[in-house]
Amino acid sequence: MAYKPGGDLVTKDGRTSQYMASGYTPTFSVHLDVQSIATQTAYMLIDLSDTTNWPHTNTGHAVIEWIIIEADPDNTFTGEIKLGFLSAVDATNGDFNQVIDIDMARSSSLIIENMDYGSHGIEMELASWFGPTTANSTLFQTDVNLGGPDDPTTLTYPSGAGDVVLIVERTAGTVDVSITIGYETAP
């Protein structure tokens, strides 16, 4: 393509085209760092309804653009690290819709994953989802709070539909997990 004075692009066969940016959606980031996890534990990554503590303003659903995750197990750790979003959360349980599952066999090796989903990302909502679901998990309840990115041991947040969460399922040993997510939210 050649540039034509006046702002239009001209293709090789002489046709003109125009490019227009019709909007801008900000990308937010969140980081969680937890050490020596020795039990099955769930963490809040994006509390969709909380626009006070998280930087987003839309509360429709999250769209994950990129993830960097690091897991540093001791030499006896076995378990899984799972990332997903919640649905059907009430005072007794909630459904966990799994997006990522990292199975960790007994190993003392550091695992670092960098996943980039491009400009369209992964829509974290049931209307765009088909995959494994853990139904009626008691890890997620509207009256039981999860540790969050700012202080996973003392600052906690209630679970709700649409929230993006991390589960560390531990069978043996301990693991340190660090995760950073770039995301947008939809109205």
Image (tube, helix red, strand yellow):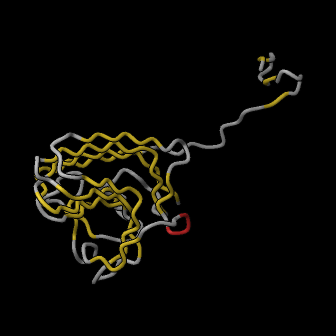
Q: Quadrant of the N terminus?
A: top right
Q: Position of residue 89 (x, y in %)?
A: 36, 77
Taking the view exactly as shown, the residue that stands out farthest to the right is: 14
The residue under the point 11% across, 59% down is 38
Residue 183 left/right relative to 54: right
Residue drawn where x is 46% and y is 50% of the image: 184
List the single residue furthest toward the bottom.
92
Q: Residue at x 26, y 41 (%)?
A: 111
Q: Is residue 99 above or below residue 113?
A: below
State the residue in front, 114 or 76.
76
At x 47%, y 66%, the residue is 131
Whether residue 130 sits left or right of residue 165 in the image: it is: right
Residue 50 falls in image quadrant: bottom left
Return the x and y of residue 88 as percentages of the image width and height: 40, 78
Task: Between residue 8 and residue 44, name the one nearer to us.
Answer: 44
Q: Nearer the viewer, residue 38 or 30?
A: 38
Residue 56: horizontal and vertical position, in percent? 41, 53
Tell me if 54 is positioned left or right of 169 in this view.
Answer: right
Image position of 130 with respect to 136: above or below? above
Total marks placed: 0
Front-most of residues 35 and 23:
35
Q: Position of residue 93 (x, y in %)?
A: 30, 80
In this view, the residue farthest toward the front is: 106
